[in-house]
Image (tube, coloured by chain):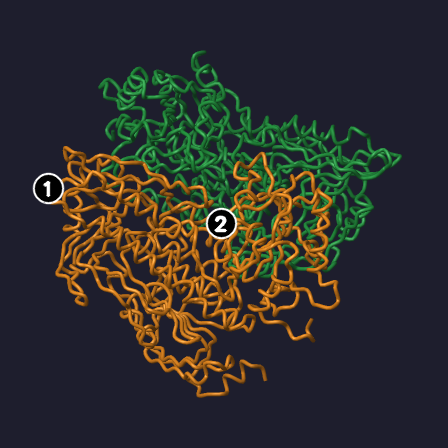
Chain colours: A orange, B green
Amino acid sequence: MDQETEIQNADSDSDSYTDVLIVGAGPAGLMALYWMAVYGVRARIIDKRGTKVFTGQADGLRPRTLELFDSMGFQHRVIHEGHVAVEANFWVPDRNGKLTRQGPHCSPKINESNHHNMLLTQGRVERFVIDAIQNYSDLEIERGIIAESFEYDENLENDLDAYPITVGLRTLSDEEANPVHLTTNTNESGQQIPNEQGRGSLLPDDWNELIQKSHIRKTKIETVKAKFIIGCDGAHSWTRKQVNIPLDGSVTDHIWGVIDIVPLSNFPDMRRLGTITHSSGTILVIPRERNLVRLYVPVQIVNNTSDTRFDRSAITLEMIKTRIQDIISPYTFDFQICDWWAAYQIGQRIAPSFNKGSRIYLAGDAVHTHSPKVGLGMNMSMQDGFNIGWKVAMVAIGAANPAILNTYTEERHPLAEMLLEFDKLWSGEFTETNENGVANSDKAERMVDVVEKFMDFADGLKVYYSESLLVWKDSKDIGSDATLNLIPGERIPPVKLRNQAEGNSKWTTRLFESDGLFRIIILAGDIRTEEQKKRVEILGTVLAGKDQTKISPIHRYVHIPGHKDQIRVITIHSAPWKEVEFFDFPEILRPFDPIMGWGYGDIWCDGFCDWDPHCQGKGYEKWGVDRTRGAMLILRPDQYIGWAGELEEVDEMTAYLDGVLVKMPTSEL
Amino acid sequence: MDQETEIQNADSDSDSYTDVLIVGAGPAGLMALYWMAVYGVRARIIDKRGTKVFTGQADGLRPRTLELFDSMGFQHRVIHEGHVAVEANFWVPDRNGKLTRQGPHCSPKINESNHHNMLLTQGRVERFVIDAIQNYSDLEIERGIIAESFEYDENLENDLDAYPITVGLRTLSDEEANPVHLTTNTNESGQQIPNEQGRGSLLPDDWNELIQKSHIRKTKIETVKAKFIIGCDGAHSWTRKQVNIPLDGSVTDHIWGVIDIVPLSNFPDMRRLGTITHSSGTILVIPRERNLVRLYVPVQIVNNTSDTRFDRSAITLEMIKTRIQDIISPYTFDFQICDWWAAYQIGQRIAPSFNKGSRIYLAGDAVHTHSPKVGLGMNMSMQDGFNIGWKVAMVAIGAANPAILNTYTEERHPLAEMLLEFDKLWSGEFTETNENGVANSDKAERMVDVVEKFMDFADGLKVYYSESLLVWKDSKDIGSDATLNLIPGERIPPVKLRNQAEGNSKWTTRLFESDGLFRIIILAGDIRTEEQKKRVEILGTVLAGKDQTKISPIHRYVHIPGHKDQIRVITIHSAPWKEVEFFDFPEILRPFDPIMGWGYGDIWCDGFCDWDPHCQGKGYEKWGVDRTRGAMLILRPDQYIGWAGELEEVDEMTAYLDGVLVKMPTSEL
């Protein structure tokens, strides 16, 4: 009797078991689910809505999020459909009150990532993640299902074989799962808005999903027992409420309008990212895919009450349009096509913790709400889900030390705090009024200052992950000197490399796939020198475990589905591509498989390529690594650096891995 | 009674009508079908096989083909899945008989296209084209159907409303449509080959097609009447035989083997494009996607008979492997995974004409057969289909002068002749034997010479399309001086540009979409100078037709579905991006639509972009156009230059268009 059968018989027929239950299939939940698919975890994901999102919602994609998409294999689709917005323009009144462009302002760090800020509707992003999930597994999103009851048996928390969580699920009727406002573009006030949800504005893959949604649905009650639950169920998170975690903070006193329209306007920068400040407020203009433009505008001030929500039905599309026309004047503004619109009032609120014990986790809007105007909501939510997903998955399959789960709140909470601080400052710039109708002359300058202050954080160039089991900051001095810009707790700055065996070029963001493996990155330096070649050969011998006293760190850990080892070794040398051969490197760095042959994908060159201007052979310099001596890194499955050191520091590196990963029983080695 | 109903009633129930019937849904047929979808032509396509190709067949994709894919909107998928092979290595014995690398050799013209040689199995390429077709229309490929009878009534040839072609179709049984060797990897000799057609090696979109293929099929006989027929039915073309067009030439005396395998070898360049010459022959090595490598090897010499086909069952996979092992020795060679293999004997044969009258066209292998080793078969076939497709489609919908159909054979036949000449020389290098087992020392040099001699042709950098209604070579001298490298009958060399309104960068290969439109490309020069600004304004006035004596060339021609005009104007200026505004250009160059707003996609800048190294602002120089004065072009729907001249030459340009396009009835203007 296998484990599955045993479980089925263990309880009443109406109970089912899953290792991980994800509540909410928005950006955060889908990212967490991605890892369940990668690691082959027995998981389920439910969402109360009958279909995925098709229009509206979030649209901003920051460089780090795009780097993650690249590692997940679908960034080419985002580039194909999305809109790049790099330069920002700030329109402010001059001393005569005439709107004048300040800009374009371009980030001085624009080339620190291979990906630039993009805009694309959340609906398409969700489609891409879902397709990536389906490349790995048959996991399906169970839509039109809500969680209704929750029990948690704390006594079972430390027993990894136990199912301490019990959740009651109910299948919704079609009407409940597909409320009118989700399937048509009629707004809550009954206004008719041009409905763009015909085939013309949807791509075929979404179209199919939309027409398939109306399947016959039987209302059903089910009890699920789970080892872990990840609540990705939005600002009004049901999951968060079950575990009594509050959202601290307050709502602001402004009501905002947001519209996705095809503009009819003579404003010069209607297709450029920017702000327009005039008299009583500021508009944010965001160019989008398919001729759409999103505009955010403060609509009115309500009484400052910390808990009362305003009556959204008081705001109409006409009201938002008129407000924009007032601010943008003397330029014209109108539209015939409105893809989506909403009115909202949002405060900066944050949960004190993103987890309850070691089995219950919360991600995305469930633990931090803020205004959408910094274009970070989808990014933060996806990165939350990405962070907790691989950790829970690895623990669930018994491949990682459960202690890594503690790092989730440690790593993500400080970033959510930064997000709120950024949002407060940025939102303030939009609602600040000026009695005489003329903004301060330094308005644009102040906005640039806010953007630049938070740039590293917002673009994800830095995540500031603190020291932990997963991030070893205390490398020896020699280690940190050797890897000046390769900092444990940060991402590896993207570089385009050439494959040694093939000559093809590839960005590290694509090379380091989100395939669930830890990676040892050997920056092998220049093996044309005898001394360096010797160092690399010794490293190869140590890694191969030929010293019979210990088992190679590459082979000693519990495997994950589809991979022979939990560790993948990638070597990046610094010699010119033509002056070194694939077979010059120790065999352990390019291992032979009796079916798949040599590891041609494992040896890379930071060398100049005269047919690819992105491939300049300056990666070592970007990383702050000596081109002759090289260095060595551990990348976590989410491609953040876990450890950095010298080629000789295999013992320290192995100690890092031993602390994180579960060793295989000796009998299986 | 609409036209459709009229036709239905006009004849017996078993007859059906279509404007264009395409026979064969391989690369050539699909490219032709693409245009039917774009122009909304009533068309059908049949194929005798029950499914599309999944493994094997062609795999080489040349730059020009990739440029076309870009214009069709799916090149990002090819880049994501395919393998780039830019440098070639020639391994020849040195004077001691030891195999030695000559290379890598890289084309001196490598950067003349934004796309480089790629390798990807034909099955995926067909998938992408099918998906592109489905983005435009509901046209479906009718599989498992053969054409059995053919009648042609020449008397109706000049009546565009008539259906001179009558074809009898028969639906095949499942067994006929899906012969064993197409659905399993058991070869004709009964050998078992590792079957890689499981889910692991197919992507989900293909997998779905494979499992859906076994639908219940009723044998059915149908008579179809068509205005046009395009035969894309391969080397044994049924269509060609109906019209008694021969294939001239002869088969060669060599039998070749080709295998797609995952190599187990210590040969240093097993993942690099190249050749290995030793004793009695030469192997061609082609690295591919998914760890596959394709190898071509001459297996044996048969008697030189011009018509007899050799017995392919005499060749086994083992025989091919042994032959490779002999040549590659002392390096090892073996494999566990074989994705596909075949033995073939091919000569250079060509049809004297690619059409019969003005209604019957042949494309691809139906009119030219050759060895696959130059990696051009799929490219030539697709470009044939691409060339005839838009011409037939435009005539079928009444938008173009039927005389343009004459240009098909004129344009494509000389290229097929070049292909055969290239193939003869290149193949000769593989089968040339050397009695003492040591190749000539200049072997590698000679191979490079052959490759370089045919490079412009093979990569599609030049097509040498001759003077015709569609290609005006006789532009005034001043015209050709103004556009040194923009030559009528050739493609426009790719350049990356910035959108003036948005700041996004885009390659011309993507900007000039294959959407069925003729394009006027206005190289507006530098409008910061008063004189040039004046020239552009005058041009705008002339194009707008404000001179009441004539109707604007932009608005005067019959429309195609989904577009307001048959002519799209794209302006590319040469001033720095920040020093010019979108609204600086005449309105006719950025027309306003009451629903979609201004034509933001119409004004582009050949300017430097500091976050995109491909965007250097050197396009005018590449095109040989004066940065101040600019020039003007017509691009045909297939993006070949039809006419080139100065901004003042609207009359001559209009004369070109008048010769090609059909004017709208004056009442509809």
Up the image or down, B623 lies above or below B500; here it is above
SS class, disc 2: strand
Q: Nearer the viewer, residue A127 or B9?
A: A127
Residue with the most extreme top position: B477
* The C terminus of chain A: image quadrant: bottom right
Q: Which of A324 and B368 is in front in this view?
A: A324
SS class, disc 1: loop
Crowding at dot 1, Cα within 10 Å, few <14 / some 14-19 / many 20+, comes out as few
Q: Mark 1 lies on which chain?
A: A
Q: Mark 1 points at which residue?
A: A436
List x then y, in percent, for residue A609. Answer: 59, 37
Residue with the most extreme right position: B436
Using residue A191 as the reference point, say whether residue A247 is left or right of it: right
Up the image or down, A439 lies above or below B639; here it is below
Query: Which amino acid type corresponds to the residue marked 2 in the rendered image?
Result: Ile
Nearer the camera: disc 2 or disc 1: 1
Q: Mark 2 points at which residue?
A: B141
Q: Residue at x 26, y 55 (%)?
A: A424
List x then y, in percent, for residue B62. Answer: 58, 36
Q: Are callouts 2 and 1 both on one chain?
A: no
CA separation, marks 2 and 1? 67 Å
